[in-house]
Image: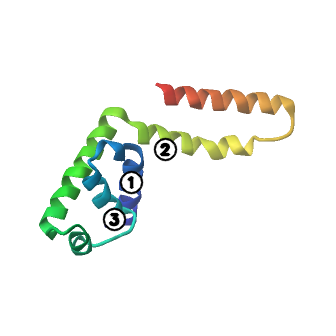
Amino acid sequence: MKLAEQVRYSRLLDFYGGMLTQNQCNIMRSYVDFNATLEEIATTVGTTRQAVSDVLRRSIAKLMDMENRLGLVAKFEAILNQVPAIAKKISPDECMQAVITKEFTTILKTLED
């Protein structure tokens, strides 16, 4: 699995992992966060590589479906992209504090949408 894919699945799992069964979540965590092979996971949970592959495929599809419906990861990433620009503006000046507060308020409102 490519690193970008691994990061994407890990983030989806962080946001929507509660929508998976405990078994699906455990298998996804092993595969994504611990980089375990299908064979290692199958041995750990006492099943076949094919069964692990099927669980991963269905779990990823479910996570992607949740993201397509809710878009929480996309909103989170949009906010993360704005943080460096805002951080550059931080200064002890009271006027700048008001600007920063306003920008963070705007960002928080985008989360609510």
Mark toward the viewer: 3 or 1? 3
Whether pointer 2 and pointer 3 mark residues with C-beta atoms closer than 8 Å, the reply is no
Q: Position of residue 91 (x, y in %)?
A: 82, 41
Dot 3: within a 10 Å radius of its alpha carbon, few (fewer than 14), some, or many (20 or more) residues?
Answer: some
Mark identifier at residue 77: 2
Which element is circle 3 on?
Answer: helix
Quarter residue 30 falls in: bottom left
Could you give the CA–CA distance between mark 2 and mark 3, rounded to whole angstroms?
24 Å
Q: Amino acid at mark 1?
A: Arg
Residue corresponding to mark 3 = 30
Quarter of the rendering occupied by the N terminus: bottom left
For image coordinates 31% across by 65% down, the residue present is 31
Task: Give whichever of 78, 65 is nearer the camera.
Answer: 65
Q: Position of residue 106 (x, y in %)?
A: 60, 27
Residue corresponding to mark 1 = 8
Q: Amino acid at mark 3?
A: Ser
Which element is circle 1 on?
Answer: helix
Q: Earlier in the sequence, mark 3 or mark 1?
A: 1
For image coordinates 55% across by 25% down, the residue present is 109
Q: Amino acid at mark 2?
A: Glu
- Left or right for 39, reference 96: left
- Left or right for 83, reference 87: left
Q: How many marks?
A: 3
Q: Earlier in the sequence, mark 2 or mark 1?
A: 1
Mark toward the viewer: 2 or 3? 3
